[in-house]
Image (spheres, rainbow, N blue to C red):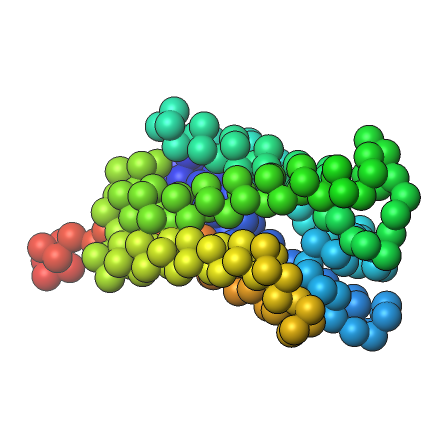
Amino acid sequence: MDLFEKSAFKQKFTIGLLGILLPIMTISSCLFFGEHKIPRSISASYYTNSMPILEVSLGILGVVFITYSNKNLFYSIIHWLIGISAIGIAIFPTYVESFAGPVGIFDLMGATSGIFHQIFTGIFFVLIAFTMVFLLANCFETKFSFPRHHDKYYFASGIIEAFLLLVLAFGIIFDLNSYFHEFIFLLEVLLLWNFGICFMINSWDIYHQSQPQKNVSDEIS
């Protein structure tokens, strides 16, 4: 495994791990150390004691995407945009009606900050789905060919990500949280876990494919 492959493996693994752990850490913090209830969304945990977990996780996620080294310029640009979006989500907190004061580092009113938050969230998940469907399976960043069934998995995961995002948008527009309090939260958890697991598998593919392949003739001799 050369330096480029090691970097790709570590970065994909970190991205996947953060995607999986962020909902778990948020739920644990809210249930055991905060208000002892699940917030209306992961983004709304900004207004709970889970705020440091949310902000630090998004910050790390953004930095990892932005610093992701890739030999393909288009792939790199997509990752830069995802990273900027992750940081934008952290900088502009979501709007919560119970908190009317200025929020975030720019002291914007909650409603204004919420608009930017939704824009960056939409960009983030759209590009994540795009990456899963069109980039992971085609393996732009390595010279290796992933197992065909994994290519199909990446494609299917990207389609699922896009579908969940559409359902999330539908839920926000029609305020389905008023009927089912955890609706938005559960969808965000599924979105994060879906891409987290996908990136974890991709990191393992990179690791596995970068290992020296044994020559059958050498083994016989």
Q: Nearer the viewer, residue 47 or 218?
A: 47
- Is any part of residue 134 visible from this angle? yes
Image quadrant assignment for residue 45: bottom right
Name the quadrant of the C terminus.
bottom left
Task: Identify which residue is drawn at 86% across, 70% down.
Answer: 35
**Where residue 193 sits: x, y (%)?**
52, 62
Q: Residue furthest top?
A: 73
**Where residue 4 sits: x, y (%)?**
42, 34
Q: Residue furthest right?
A: 101
Is residue 117 positioned above or below 181 on the image? above
Q: Nearer the viewer, residue 191 or 28?
A: 191
Image quadrant assignment for residue 103: top right
Say left or right for 24 vs 53: left
Is residue 180 positioned above or below 75 on the image? below
Task: Identify which residue is drawn at 71% across, 43% down.
Answer: 114
Name the quadrant of the N terminus.
top left
